Image (cartoon, rainbow, N blue to C red):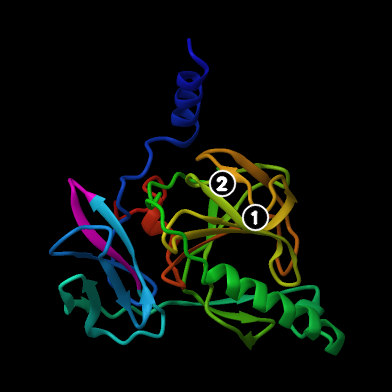
Amino acid sequence: MPYKIICIIFFSLLFGKPALALPHANPVPGGIALVELPAAGDNIKAYFQKKRLAIVYENNKPYALVGIPLSTRAGKQQLQLKTAQGSQQLAFTVKPKTYKAQYLTIKNKRKVNPYEKDMARINKERKKKNRAKKHWSQQPVHADFITPVKGQISSIFGLRRFFNKQPRRPHSGLDIAAARGTPIHAVADGKVIEAGNFFFSGNMVYIDHGQGLISLYAHMNRIDVKVGDSIRQGQVIGLVGSTGRVTGPHLHLAVIANQTLVDPLLFLDELNPEK
């Protein structure tokens, strides 16, 4: 049996049925909207809140994949479509959603209240994160994600977080608890655009999947890829760990669309109860 077919069978058994080409639309703050476009073509560009959107296809129909920031108010929203003939506004509606609170106790208090000498590193790392978040590549979008690691969901996206009773930013991804050393697989084809050790996130990797769609893997025990590497879906990129600000070993998976952190469950058919 050819090696390629063996690999396909192996990953089908390991991860179950792959996600559909399009993620699950849920137009709420922190979710995504899929807005059908009236035309397709290389010269078409779509924007929401001045950030360029990925364009994905299903049955040859083009859709703008809109990442909706958590700060977005419910109600009518508009994206801007630019073509050779001019520009137009396309409307869509954002539904309300309230996220629950989560209280965590962090033993390493320095990870909650960093020392003054830590701030230079944190600020430097923030710039690297922002560059990765804004990365854009003009290539077809790989949005048919697989689950990156086998484990139990320990924390969902959007929770209003309190560390040692101190309010912090909402949870920006999906936490999957797994034993230290468990292999982490790339959710889709892509290219590594950032990798390294970060104060809060520990060992972390960013993978570009085209047109501003990016996956992020944090708190890794080990990183097995480097910046510039081309990655295939299912490839092992590192191991689960407990580096950075954590309460135990797990993978923190985040998904970025149009520079916006969105709910990873919308891209994971196997884990999403709404699919």
Verify CB contact (< 8 Å) between mark 1 and mark 2. yes
Q: Main secondary structure of the magenta part?
A: strand
| Residue underneath mark 1 | 250
* Element marked by disc 1: strand
| Residue underneath mark 2 | 151
Question: Mark 2 Cα within 10 Å, few/some/many (few <14, many 20+)?
Answer: some
> Spatial distance from mark 1 to mark 2, Cα to Cα?
9 Å
Q: Quadrant of residue 224?
A: top right
Does residue 43 sit above or below 52 in this rendering?
above
139 part of magenta stretch: no
Mark 2 is on which residue type? Answer: Gly
Which range of residues does the magenta coloring cover? Answer: 58-67
Mark 1 is on which residue type? Answer: His
How far across and down, in percent of the image, does residue 78 sit? 22, 81
Looking at marks 1 and 2 on the same chain, the residue that comes earlier in the sequence is marked by 2
Of residues 234 and 164, the one nearer the viewer is 234
How far across and down, in percent of the image, does residue 207 sit? 56, 55
How far across and down, in percent of the image, does residue 129 sit? 62, 72
Q: Which mark is residue 44?
A: none
